[in-house]
Image (tube, helix red, strand yellow):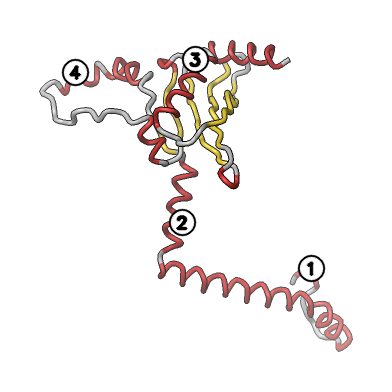
C-alpha cells in the first residue's frame, strides 16, 4: 500500500510546475535522537488544489551540520524525483545550520548601464533562480522570535503584567455581577421596580 501511494504522489509531483520544500529538525527530549522532516507543497493539477505532503522523516546524527542537512534534502528530492529546477524555495527555521545550508551567493548590486535589459531578461532570471535552493525563513518561527524578544523587554513586560492584572480584575467583577444579577432581578420584581430583564444584562 505504501509503495502504491508513493507512486501516486510521485506522479503528482512530476506533474507539478513548481514545488516548495519545507524542512525542520526535531530533537527528542533528553537529546537521544534527532529527526529531519522534509515536506513538499505544490499545486495538484488533477484536483486543482494545493497539497502539502511529508516526503521523508529521517533520523539525523549529531552534529546537525549544514552539509549533512543539504545531503539529506538532496537525497530526499532525488528519491521523490523532484529536480532542483522545479524547487522555488526551501522554507526553514532561522537556525544557523539552516541558514548556512541554503545560503545563496550575494549578487553584485552595483548599477549597470544596461538597466533597460533587466525588464526583458526578467523571465530568464526567474528561471535561473530555480534550482539554487533559495532559503526563505518560516514566518511563524520568525514571529515567535520577535514575540520572545519583545517579552524580554522590561518596559513591555511591566505593561503586559498590568494588562494581565486588569483583565483578571475585570473578569472577577464580571463573574461577580453575573452571580448577583438573579438576586437583584428578583428583589426588583418583588419591590415593583422597573429594571432590565435578565436577557438584557
CB within 8 Å, label 1 to label 3: no
CB within 8 Å, label 3 to label 4: no
The answer to which of marks 4 and 2 sits earlier in the sequence is: 4
Q: Is residue 11 above or below residue 106?
A: above
3D distance between C-alphas at marks 2 and 3: 37 Å
Q: Is residue 117 left or right of residue 27?
A: left
Looking at the rendered structure, which numbered label has been put on residue 78? 3
Label 2, on which residue?
148
Name the quarter where the C terminus is drawn. Answer: bottom right
What percent of the width, then of the height, locates residue 72? 48, 24
> What's the residue at 59%, 19% (across, down)?
48
Question: Image quarter for residue 156?
Answer: bottom left
3D distance between C-alphas at marks 1 and 2: 42 Å
3D distance between C-alphas at marks 4 and 2: 45 Å
Q: Nearer the viewer's eye, disc 4 or disc 2? A: 2
Label 1, on which residue?
199
Amino acid at each position: 500500500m505504501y509503495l502504491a501511494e508513493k507512486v501516486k504522489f510521485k506522479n503528482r509531483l512530476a506533474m507539478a510546475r513548481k514545488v516548495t520544500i519545507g524542512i525542520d529538525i526535531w530533537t527528542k527530549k533528553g537529546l537521544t535522537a534527532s529527526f529531519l522532516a522534509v515536506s513538499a507543497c505544490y499545486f495538484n493539477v488533477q484536483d486543482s488544489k494545493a497539497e502539502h505532503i511529508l516526503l521523508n522523516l529521517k533520523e539525523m546524527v549529531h552534529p546537525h551540520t549544514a552539509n549533512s542537512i543539504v545531503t539529506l534534502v538532496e537525497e530526499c528530492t532525488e528519491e521523490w524525483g523532484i529536480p532542483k529546477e522545479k524547487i522555488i524555495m526551501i522554507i526553514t527555521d532561522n537556525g544557523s545550520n539552516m541558514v548556512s545550508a541554503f545560503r545563496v551567493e550575494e549578487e553584485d548590486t552595483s548599477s549597470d548601464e544596461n538597466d533597460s535589459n533587466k525588464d526583458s531578461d526578467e523571465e530568464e532570471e526567474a528561471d535561473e533562480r530555480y534550482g539554487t535552493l533559495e532559503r526563505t525563513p518560516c514566518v511563524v518561527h520568525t514571529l515567535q522570535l520577535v514575540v520572545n524578544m519583545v517579552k524580554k523587554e522590561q518596559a513591555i513586560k511591566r505593561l503586559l503584567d498590568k494588562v494581565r492584572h486588569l483583565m483578571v480584575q475585570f473578569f472577577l467583577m464580571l463573574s461577580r455581577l453575573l452571580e448577583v444579577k438573579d438576586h437583584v432581578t428578583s428583589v426588583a420584581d418583588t419591590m415593583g421596580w422597573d429594571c432590565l430583564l435578565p436577557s438584557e444584562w
